[in-house]
Image (cartoon, rainbow, N blue to C red):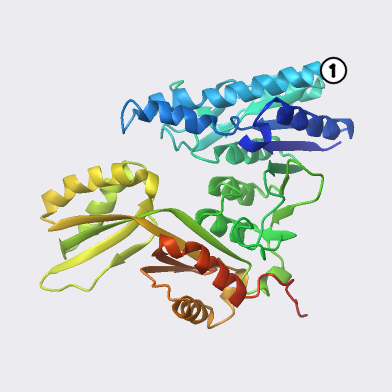
Amino acid sequence: MALVVQKFGGTSVGDIKKIENVARKAIAEYERGNKVVVVVSAMAGETNRLLALAHSITDLPDERELDVLVSTGEQVSVALLAITLKKLGYKAKSYLGSQVKILTDSAFTKARILEVESRNILKDLDEGYIVVVAGFQGVDKDGNITTLGRGGSDTTGVAIAAGLKADVCDIYTDVDGVYTTDPRIYNKARKLKKISYDEMLELASLGSKVLQIRSVELAKKYKVPVHVRSSFTDEPGTIVCEEDKDMEKVVVSGVSYNKDEARITLVNVPDRPGIAAQVFGEISKGNIVVDMIIQNSSIDGTTDLTFTVPKSDLKKALILIEKIAKDLGVKEVLSDDSIAKVSIVGLGMRSHSGVAAKMFEVLGKAGINILMISTSEIKISCAIDEKYTELAVRVLHDAFELDKEPTVEG
């Protein structure tokens, strides 16, 4: 008997017919003799609807109250799925994040899971229940409802799988696996049979919507095998797992893009020790993630400082920056929300030279100007004008021949 955690996203529970399909998949796993925990997101579009209601009142709603509001989407989903399972003749019980409980910190809208209490779930599983858990939500030490950020149900699924020491965490979604790039913008995209935790981490951080980055971090930390697969077929998907020697021989595994990028530039920043710490310290107080950073060479004791933040955090970041910029005597604060980031990822970059040069050459030949560059051991990212995103993805995918199965030499 295996313990299986299944996670279903919003499109998978978008209406009653789809919820019945989720119930059948859970039942099929249960009938194989396995213990089953199902984690579900809010119904497709519901979180956006709730956020729109809040933003119709104010541009910057209180984040504690936002979490109270948007967490109701998952409450609807777990109840409907449990009702469906019971109608089909199976024992089922639903839990909210506060009932499991999923303990988080108090960073509202972007909370991090600290602990998952597994006692209630294990008891129910032993008694033959299919357990249904609300994704995306938790509770802090003071009893406040918290949410985990967009895609947070993935993190819930993996965290529960880790806490229960599950044999596998199946992430069911509207795509049938992890592809070399987004198949919706390039029909040459190829489904990967498996991908390493590290490569998936990079892809998730760089804009791939298949898995939330924190879910991959947890999977890697606790060595939880993750199977990304389609809610609408029974075909095998992509296994996210520990790397092996064959993976290291593939130079580039995928091309990702992210249009949720905004650029902020501080013009004529005093060039003295501690300034960057003050600027980014202020940004961190708002729980805003800074990605790319460029600081120009000092001229006459001043410099320009440019960095990127999520587009959704731009207004909040500018409010924080305008305050400190005035104190520092910064000449001007500029912003641009029409940029995108395109990236290539692959374990083979560790041991192959010339990958960056090839990427820059390919983009240059396509007439795409590079605004910013960042690298890690297994990825290269370029900020570009948003209107060239799809073109950049296609030319890079072709240049590295990602539509072909890699030939792995011994």
> Residue 353 versus residue 192: which sits nearer the camera?
192
The answer to which quarter of the image holds residue 25 is top right
> Residue 161 versus residue 133: which sits nearer the camera?
133
Residue at point 24% right, 44% down? 320
Label 1 crowd bin: few (<14), some (14–19), many (20+), radius 10 Å:
few
- Residue 321 visible in the snapshot: yes
Residue at point 63% right, 48% down? 219
Provide residue 151's location: percent of width, then percent of height: 55, 41
**Horizontal placement of 378 versus 174: left or right?**
left
The answer to which quarter of the image holds residue 109 is top left
Against 291, residue 83 (above or below) is: above
Provide residue 82's location: percent of width, then percent of height: 72, 20
Identify which amino acid the numbered label 1 is placed on: Gly
Residue at point 69% right, 43% down? 171
**Horizontal placement of 377 versus 134: left or right?**
left
Reading the image, the residue beneath label 1 is 89
User: Regarding mark 1 in the picture, which secondary structure is present there?
Assistant: loop
The answer to which quarter of the image holds residue 20 is top right
